[in-house]
Image: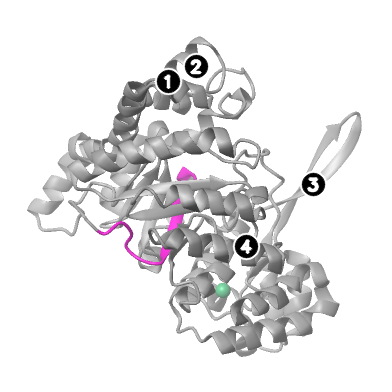
C-alpha cells in the first residue's frame, strides 16, 4: 500500500469518460496524480478500473467521496428529466448507508447536521465512506475481466500496475458557508476524527477536505475559528475547495485571504488546492506558500468550480494563452497573438506563443490561417419562444486540439524551472501589451498576481 498521500504537485481531475484520451498515452507522464469523483466510480467502476490498471499504468489516484452532494437541494442529485435520483447517486447511497438512506430515500430530504448526532451512525458512516474509496476500484481491478487480462499481461512480463489502492482516503465532509458554518463544522470534525482512527488502523493516509464559500474566506473571524477547529485533528493532508473561486477573477484582497487560509491550515498539515490556476502553481512551486504541496485542475475548464453546479453553459471555443495563463475566446486569442507577433512566422509562434506538440503540428506556413483550427465551429439553429436562434458550437476536433494544447501548457507550468522575478516581469509585460487589445477584464489578473507573488 502506498504511504505517500500525494505523488507530486500536479493533480488532474478525471471528468468524463470522454476525457480519458487526454490522460493517457503521451499525456500520461505530464501529470502526477488523478482525482476521481465518487459518482464516476459508482457510475462506471469496471471501465474506471481497467482504465487505471491498463491505460493509466501506475498512476496514483484517490477518490473524492462527494458526501456534500447529499446536503444540498434534491435537484442536485436528481435527473433533470424524470426528477428521479441519478443512478450513480442511488449506488452511492447504497454504499454509504445511513443517514443518507433514511433522509434521501425515505424522507426525500437532504441531510442536516442533526442527522449526525448519533456517534454510532457517524462511525458506521465513516467506515462505509472510507471503504468505498479503498475498495470499489481496487476490488474491481482485482476481480474483473481486466484483472484476468492483466494477470496474463504480467505473465508475459508487460508493464502493468499492481498497486490498486488509492494513495489516501478522504473523510466525509460537508460544505461550509458563513451561514451554516456553526452547524456543519462540528459534523465535519466528528467525521474527520473517526476517519483518522480508521485510517490509522489501516495504515493509509487520511486527507481532510475543507470546502468553504468565498464569504468565509473573506471573514477573518470565521477563518480563524475554522483553522482553530481543524488544528485539533491531525490529518496527513488538507484538501481545499473554495466555492467558485477563480484566481483570474479574484482581487488582491481575496488572494491574500486565500494565502492566509492556506498558511493557517498549513500549520497542521500540508495543503492541496483541488481547483487552482497558475497563481497557485507559482505560489506553491516558488515556495512562497511552502504549505501548498499540490494544485489540481480539470481538463481546460477545471481551474475553479462551484460547489452546487449551475448547469452546463454553452461550450465556447477558447484557447489557453500561455503567457496570460488564461483561456481566451477564440477571437480575443487571435487578436492577442497578432499583437504579440505570434503570426509573423511559425517560428515566431513557437517562440512567442506556444511550441507544444500540437501547436507545432497545427501552426505551419500560414500561422494566422492555421490558427483557425483552434476556433472552428458549426452553426446550430433552433427555435426559442418561437424565434429562430443560431449558436456556434466548437467542432469535436477543435476541442481535441484546444484540450491537448492546454494539457501541454499545464505540463510546462508545473515542470519548467520557475523564477519568481521572471514570472512577475512576464505577467506585467503581458498585461501591458494586451490591455488595450483584449480589455482590462482579460488581463487584470496579471497585475494582481504580480502583487501577490511579490508578497
Ligand atoms: Zn500549444
In screen coordinates, is 390 left or right of 157?
right
Measure the C-alpha gap from mark 1 to mark 2.
Answer: 6 Å
| Closer to the eye: label 2 or 3 | 2
Q: Is residue 253 left or right of residue 404?
A: right
| Start-end of magenta stretch | 4-17
Residue at 45% of width from left, 38% of height from top? Answer: 188
Q: Given the current orientation, which residue lies at the most extreme right position?
A: 387
Which of label 1 and label 4 is nearer to you?
A: 4
Q: Nearer the viewer, residue 434 or 178?
A: 178
Q: Classify 130 as above or below 266.
A: above
Q: First in sequence: mark 1 or mark 4? A: 1
Answer whether labels 1 and 2 touch (C-beta < 8 Å): yes
Q: Which residue is mark 4?
A: 257
Q: Position of residue 83 (x, y in %)?
A: 61, 18
The local secondary structure at tag 1 comes to loop
Q: Quadrant of residue 341?
A: bottom right
What whole-number distance in Å separates the C-alpha atoms at marks 3 and 4? 39 Å
Answer above or below: position of 301 versus 362.
Answer: above
Query: Which disc is residue 103 wearing?
Result: 2
Determine if the magenta segment contains residue 335.
no
Q: Nearer the viewer, residue 158 or 295?
A: 295
- Where does the image place residue 20, in percent across and percent down from the top left? 43, 51
Residue for badge 3 = 391
Amino acid at each position: 500500500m502506498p504511504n505517500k498521500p500525494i505523488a507530486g504537485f500536479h493533480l488532474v481531475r478525471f471528468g468524463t469518460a470522454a476525457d480519458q484520451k487526454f490522460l493517457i498515452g503521451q499525456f500520461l507522464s505530464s501529470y502526477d496524480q488523478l482525482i476521481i469523483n465518487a459518482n464516476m466510480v459508482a457510475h462506471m467502476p469496471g471501465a474506471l478500473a481497467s482504465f487505471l490498471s491498463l491505460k493509466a499504468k501506475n498512476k496514483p489516484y484517490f477518490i473524492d467521496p462527494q458526501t456534500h452532494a447529499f446536503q444540498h437541494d434534491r435537484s442536485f442529485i436528481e435527473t433533470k428529466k424524470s426528477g428521479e435520483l441519478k443512478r450513480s447517486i442511488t449506488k452511492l447511497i447504497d454504499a454509504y448507508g445511513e443517514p443518507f438512506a433514511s433522509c434521501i430515500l425515505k424522507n426525500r430530504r437532504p441531510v442536516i447536521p442533526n442527522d449526525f448526532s448519533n456517534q454510532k451512525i457517524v462511525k458506521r458512516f465513516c467506515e462505509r465512506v472510507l471503504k468505498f474509496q479503498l475498495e470499489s476500484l481496487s476490488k474491481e481491478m482485482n476481480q474483473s475481466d481486466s484483472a484476468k487480462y492483466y494477470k496474463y499481461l504480467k505473465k508475459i512480463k508487460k508493464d502493468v500496475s499492481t498497486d490498486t489502492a488509492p494513495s489516501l482516503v478522504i473523510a466525509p465532509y460537508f460544505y461550509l458557508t458563513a451561514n451554516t458554518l456553526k452547524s456543519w463544522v462540528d459534523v465535519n470534525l466528528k467525521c474527520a476524527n473517526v476517519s483518522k482512527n480508521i485510517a490509522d488502523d489501516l495504515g493509509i493516509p487520511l486527507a481532510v477536505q475543507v470546502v468553504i464559500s468565498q464569504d468565509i474566506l473573506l471573514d477573518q473571524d470565521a477563518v480563524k475559528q475554522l483553522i482553530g477547529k481543524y488544528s485539533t485533528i491531525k490529518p496527513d493532508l488538507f484538501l481545499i475547495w473554495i466555492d467558485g473561486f477563480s484566481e483570474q477573477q479574484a482581487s488582491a484582497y481575496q488572494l491574500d485571504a486565500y494565502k492566509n487560509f492556506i498558511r493557517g491550515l498549513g500549520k497542521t498539515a500540508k495543503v492541496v488546492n483541488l481547483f487552482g490556476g497558475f497563481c497557485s502553481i507559482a505560489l506553491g512551486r516558488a515556495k512562497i506558500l511552502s504549505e501548498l504541496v499540490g494544485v489540481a485542475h480539470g481538463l481546460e475548464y477545471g481551474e475553479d468550480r462551484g460547489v452546487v453546479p449551475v448547469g452546463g453553459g454553452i461550450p465556447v471555443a477558447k484557447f489557453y494563452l500561455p503567457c496570460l495563463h488564461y483561456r481566451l475566446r477564440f477571437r480575443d486569442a487571435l487578436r492577442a497573438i497578432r499583437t504579440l507577433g505570434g503570426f509573423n512566422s511559425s517560428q515566431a509562434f513557437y517562440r512567442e506563443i506556444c511550441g507544444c506538440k500540437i501547436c507545432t503540428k497545427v501552426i505551419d506556413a500560414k500561422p494566422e490561417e492555421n490558427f483557425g483550427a483552434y476556433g472552428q465551429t458549426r452553426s446550430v439553429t433552433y427555435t426559442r419562444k418561437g424565434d429562430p436562434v443560431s449558436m456556434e458550437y466548437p467542432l469535436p476536433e477543435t476541442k481535441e486540439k484546444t484540450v491537448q494544447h492546454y494539457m501541454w501548457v499545464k505540463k510546462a507550468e508545473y515542470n519548467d524551472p520557475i523564477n519568481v522575478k521572471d514570472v512577475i516581469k512576464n505577467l506585467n509585460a503581458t498585461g501591458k501589451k494586451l490591455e488595450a487589445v483584449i480589455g482590462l477584464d482579460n488581463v487584470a489578473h496579471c497585475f494582481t498576481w504580480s502583487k501577490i507573488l511579490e508578497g
